Image: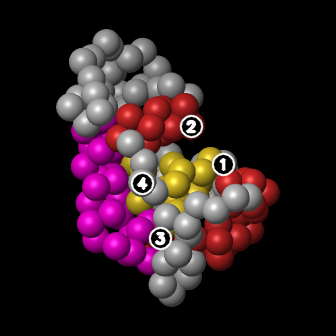
Amino acid sequence: MPNSILIAEDFDDNRELLRMILESGGYSIREARDGREALASVRAQPPLLAIIDLSMPALDGWSLLRELRADERTRAVPCVALTAFAGEGDRQRALEAGFDAYLSKPYRAKELLELVRDMLGRRTPPAADGDGDGAHPKPREATPLERE
């Protein structure tokens, strides 16, 4: 799925929640359970965006980002740092490390969807606008998750 968002998250419940929210917004999703799986997925087919948990087994989010940024084929993939350990200075540290955005858990569905839309240039998902290019969105009602 070339027009997809990759979720790299080791906890099943967290990954499922992210998937449900993003699918409710019309996005196609790919999932990875650890950093190595995520790296292989991105190298095989770069996604539109990667949402990366910072604390994963095999290869943590920090190391995954370094690998992605070092590879010419994957360095342009926008990456969101996702973490439950949101201390003072963590956002700045993530941005300085090369993440394009930062999202701390817990987050609201609306906050996640707005962040994704902003990062993708306010385009709607490819299938949502009828012509497949995402450039001319049709108005739509907010989903129950977005109304939170």
Residue contact at pointers 1 and 3, CB within 8 angstroms: no
Q: Position of residue 7 (x, y in %)?
A: 41, 60
Q: CA distance from mark 1 to mark 2?
A: 8 Å
Ranked by sequence position, the earlier of labels 1 and 3 is 3
Amino acid on which disc 2 is placed: Met
Closest to the camera, between mark 1 and mark 4, is: 4
Crowding near the residue tagged with mark 1, few <14, some 14–19, many ≥20 C-alpha atoms within 10 Å: some
Magenta extent: 8-34
Image quadrant where residue 22 sits? top left
Q: Which residue sits at x=73%, y=58%?
A: 89
Q: Which residue sits at x=65%, y=71%?
A: 62
Q: Which residue sits at x=41%, y=68%?
A: 9
Ranked by sequence position, the earlier of labels 3 and 2 is 3
Residue contact at pointers 3 and 2, CB within 8 angstroms: no
Ranked by sequence position, the earlier of labels 1 and 2 is 1
Where does label 1 land, which residue?
Answer: 100
Where does label 4 land, which residue?
Answer: 106
Q: Position of residue 6 (x, y in %)?
A: 43, 57
Closest to the camera, between mark 3 and mark 4, is: 4
Q: Secondary structure at mark 3?
A: helix
Q: Secondary structure at mark 2?
A: helix
* 146 is higher (above) or lower (below) than 92: above
Residue contact at pointers 1 and 2, CB within 8 angstroms: yes
Where does label 2 land, which residue?
Answer: 119
Q: CA distance from mark 1 to mark 4?
A: 19 Å
Residue 100 in magenta stretch: no
Where does label 3 land, which residue?
Answer: 38
Is the C terminus in the top left, top right, bottom left or bottom right quadrant?
top left
